[in-house]
Structure formats: structure tokens, C-alpha cells
Image (cartoon, rainbow, N blue to C red):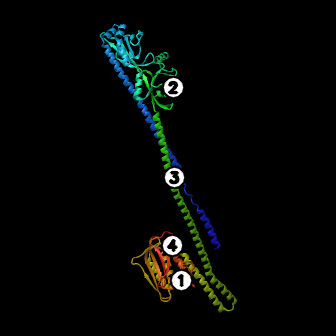
Amino acid sequence: MSMLARAVRCRHTLHVKSNVTISSPRRVKASFMWPFALVLTFILAAFVTTAYFLQVRVRDRALIDRVAAVAKLMDQKLEKDTNMIRAVLHTMQGIPAIAQAFADQDRSALLREAGPLFETLRSEHRITHLYFNNQAMRNLVRLHSPEEYGDEILRATTVQARSQNKTIHGLELGALGTLTLRVVTPWRSAPGVLGYVEMGEEIGHLIEEIHASLSVDLLVLMDKQRLPAPQWEQGLAMLKRQGSWDRFAREVMVAQTMAEIPVAVTDSILAALRVGGTRILSEDGQTLHLAMLPLTDANGQRLGDMVVMRDISGLQRTFQRSIATVTALSLLVGAFVLGLFYFALDRVERDYQRQHDLEHQLLRLDTEHARILQIEKLSALGTMVGEIAHQLNNPLVGVVNLAQLAQREPDNPVRTTELLAEIRQAGQDCHAFIASMLRFAKVSKFDCHSTDMAQVVSETVLMFRQTLRRQIQVEVQLPGEPVILMADPILLRHALFNLLVNAAQATEGEGRIVIGLKAQLHPETGVPGWMLSVRDHGKGIAPEIIDKVFTPFFTTRREGTGLGLPVVQHVALLHQGFVSVKNLPEGGTQFAVWLPQTEPAPV
Ligand SMILES: Nc1ncnc2c1ncn2[C@@H]1O[C@H](COP(=O)(O)OP(=O)(O)O)[C@@H](O)[C@H]1O
Ligand SMILES: [Mg+2]
């Protein structure tokens, strides 16, 4: 290989190397897995959280409903008892003996006449209080405590009954701190209002009834400001109940349905419940859900609070179980989806990898192919340079030798003239060779436009006939309709001329050359096109050299340049066509140039 060729090859290798940088395949799993896992975790966490808060809402709603039911039931029961007391008071006013005793403000008569009725009401209807008060609201007689009398009764119910002159009812604290339903009615008679009768019942039993019918525990707390400590302690002793005045800061317990107040119920919990919230407490394996109802007297003044406690231990266990189940299910689904996604991504990544490997292989093949082409070009260049040197060297050696001979015989003008003639012939040979090389070089000017193939053929045949020294028959076989191709007519004439010259040179004696043009698809791509063929009846081409005839400078003729067929091939390639050769079975050779019907791309 020549130095030039080696240098070019070396440079080419470097160039190729710089091209072989292929981007590494994408790490699909790494880039998608984490974001997907994050999104999935977020969705599942949102799902579990939503499920949790839904259950909390359902639980809170249930308690709020229960508290509303407590309030309603309490109201209903108070209403019922109030109506009963009203009826009794009304009936009592219709008893003349009692009316007379009251009109006379006669204490002993009242005790005598109303005593039996009060006893019946106390034993059968839980009535605990019966007062007769005069117009000035001074107590005339207490049926439930006859030894106390003469004091002024200033409780809201009595004050309102007097000021509004109608029956008033309401909850009020009893002397011993017990919560009492009181109904006060003005006792009207012909001369005017005789006074006020008050009947009351302690409502401890109501709390028990509500506890039994609504399955809630209740805790009645009184404001310490409304109930002095000695009074409360007296009540505690009388009702034989346990309790501590200091258990809560602001309030004190006066009734409850539980044996003991849970330790977890503290002042801060009560404060939170007072502003309308709910609380959950766990104690001794029991879970309580707490809410609060305010207790007010007939004046609308706050007396204290009623704490409603619902045992939600079972519900809480179900709640925890269902949240655990939802979480476990979410984790399972998450793991499953993540697994599926992982496998899908794994497949995509493997496909990527395969594609990447293929690209790599293709690029390598491409690179190798380019290198081989380069080597072939360089070796063709080497051959060409060698051939040119050879073609020029032979006549030049002749010129040098002939000139030496002429120098040796300066006195022989005849011989010198002969030698000079030979020198001139050698020079002319060189000139002819160089002229054919220049013609070859001209081929690269490519001017493509609509070309009538029939005209190209007829002009070439005309030119060819003028150069022929002997008579050879040329037959032209063209299709009926005109064939117009995008082509360079000068180059096509040049190529066809070379083929005709070769055909003529191959034809010995009488022979016939046939030029044909017929439609033919490209054998590989199927592109429509035309085949321009030149057939002769000559000696044919030996099989061992048929592959070399298109190689530049390959010739079997003594005076040949080996450039005719390379020109033809070059012209065909410029038109994005090709040239083929075959020996015919009947003898002779056919060269054919295939040209595409479509316009060749600009060169
Ligand atoms: N029609 C043909 N019949 C037989 N051999 C041919 C024909 N055309 C070309 N050849 C062979 O191909 C060689 C190369 O042809 P070409 O390139 O035209 O160069 P040249 O004509 O200068 O030899 C010829 O020397 C000849 O051996
Ligand atoms: Mg030739």
C-alpha cells in the first residue's frame, strides 16, 4: 500500500473512531421506578387516610346523634312530667277544702287537707316538693318539710310565675344540690291571686331512664358558684353518695350513672367538651367517647353541664381492625402494582438494550463497510497511478532511447529524420493517452434535464457511423411512444458511444450491433426505469475477466486505455442507475445501462 494510501487510511480510522460513540442505553427502571413508587405510596396513603377520616366522621356523627337523642329524650321526659304536675296542680285547685285553706292562709288546714294527696304523689309519682307561698312569695307551708316556713322564695320559677302571672316550669337546684324540676302556678280565685303553688320532682330518675334507654352514661355537673360546698356535702351525705368537692375546678358532680367517674376525665377535657368538641378516652381497656350538653334553669342561666359518655370499645376495635385491613390491603395492592410495573419496565429496558446493541452492531458494520470502500478506492487509485505511469513510461523510454540513437549519428540526416519521426509518434501516443484521460475527467460535469432518449440514440449512432472504418450494421429497437427521462444527454451519448465502439471492436468481419430500449423495473428496489442495451455478435468476454471489465485501465487490447467501460459505469451511477454485462448464449455480449424513470437527485 502506498504511503498516501496509508496516511488516508490512518486518518479515516481516526475519523471513524470518533464517530463510534454511542449513547449508553437509557436506565428506564431507575428513572421511572422511584417516581412511580412515590406516586403510588402517596395515593395509597391518601386512600388509607381518607378511610381513617371517614370512619372518624362516622364515629363522631354517631356520638353527636346520640347526644341529640339524649337532649331530646330529656326534653320529652321533662315535658311529660311537667304536664303531669300541671294536671295535678290544676286538679288540686279544684279541691274546695284545699282552696279554702289556702285562701285562709291556714297552715295547719293546708297540711291536713293537702297532706294525704302529697303523700300519694310522693310515693307513687316521685313528687318530692310541694310549696304553698303567699302573694308576697313568702312560704306558707312546705308539705315535704313542714317545720320550715315563712321564708321568702326567690327562685326563678316563682319570680317568673308572679311577674308573668302564668304557670312556669324549669330545672333548679334543690337545697341539697339535687337538680329538681319545678312547676309554679299562680292560684287564681275570684278576688284575685291567692298565692303560688309549687310542685317539684328530683330528676335523678330521669338520668337513669335515659341511661337505660340510650345506652349512654351521664354525668351531671353543677357550677360551684350555684351550689355552695356545705349544701353539696349535705346532699352527698343524705343521698349516701361518694364524691370530692375538689375533683374539678369549676364544677362539682351531683348525679351520675357510672359507679365512678373515669380518672381520665379532667378539667382540660371538660373545657374542651364545653366548647362543643368531642373527646375519646381510654381507660382499663374501655374506650369512651365524650360530649357535653349544657344545663340551664328557667331563666336560661347556666346551671352546669351534663357529660354524655358512650362506650365505643367494641366500635373502636372494629375501627382499628378495619383500618389495619385497609392498610394491609393497600400495601398488598401497592406491592402488586409496583411488581407489575417493575416487570413492564424491565421488559422495556431489555428491549432498549437489544435495540442499543443492534444499533451498535449496525454502526460497527457501517464503519467497517466504509473502511473497506476506502481501501478499495485507494487500491483503485494505486492501480490507476501505476497504469498511468506505465502508459506514459513506455513511449517516454522510447523517446529517450531514440534521442540517444540520434545523438550517436549526427552525420546521418536520413537516420536522424527517421528517429525523429519515431520520437514524434511516441509523443503523439502520449498525447492521445492524455486526451482520453481528459475525456474521462470531463464526465464529472453532470447536467440533468428532460431528455428524449430516441434523439440521444439517433445522434450517437450518427456520430458512431462517421468514425467507423468498415461497414457494420447498427439496428435500433425503440418503443413506440417517446421516452423522456431526466438525464444528461451528453453523458448518455458518451456512454452509448463507448459501448458501440467496444461492440464494434469485438465484432470481427460481418456483424450486427443492436441498440435496444425497453421499460424495466429496478431488480432490487422495483423502481420503474428503462434499460438501454447494446448487443453485439462478437467473441464475448472470457468468464475470468468479466468481473474486471469495469475496473479503470483494465484492457485486453494493445492500444486500449481501459477507460471506456468505467466511463459508462460512472455515467450510469450519476443517473442513479447501474450498468450490467452478460455473454449471450448465441454468442456475443450485451452491455445494458439501467436508468430510473424518476428524476435523479441533484449531485
Ligand atoms: N463488446 C465487448 N466484447 C468483448 N469484450 C469487450 C467488449 N467491451 C469491452 N470488452 C472488454 O473490456 C475491456 C475494457 O474495455 P474498455 O473499458 O472500453 O477499455 P478499452 O476499450 O480501452 O479496452 C476491453 O479491453 C475488452 O477486453
Ligand atoms: Mg473501449
Residue at mark 2: 267
Q: For mark 1, what is the residue? A: 542
Q: Are marks 2 and 4 in contact (CB under 8 Å)?
A: no
Q: Nearer the viewer, mark 2 or mark 4?
A: 2
Mark 4 lies on a secondary structure that is: helix
- Which residue bears the numbered disc 3? 342
Q: Position of residue 322 (x, y in %)?
A: 46, 40
- The residue that label 4 is drawn on is 574
Q: Amino acid at mark 1?
A: Ala
Of badges 4 and 3, nearer the viewer stands 3
Q: Amino acid at mark 4?
A: Leu
Under mark 3, the amino acid is Tyr
Q: Earlier in the sequence, mark 1 or mark 4?
A: 1
**Looking at the image, can residue 16 be seen?**
yes
Cα distance, mark 4 to mark 3? Answer: 54 Å
**Gap in angstroms between the C-alphas marked 2 and 3:** 55 Å
Q: Calculate the distance from the C-alpha at mark 1 to the C-alpha at mark 4.
A: 28 Å
Q: Residues within 10 Å of mark 1 (few under 14, many from 20)?
A: few
Residue 42, x across and y down, in percent: 50, 44
Q: Crowdedness of circle 2 by 10 Å Cα count: few (<14), some, many (20+)? A: some
Q: Earlier in the sequence, mark 2 or mark 1?
A: 2
Going from the N terminus, do you reach mark 2 or mark 3 first? Answer: 2
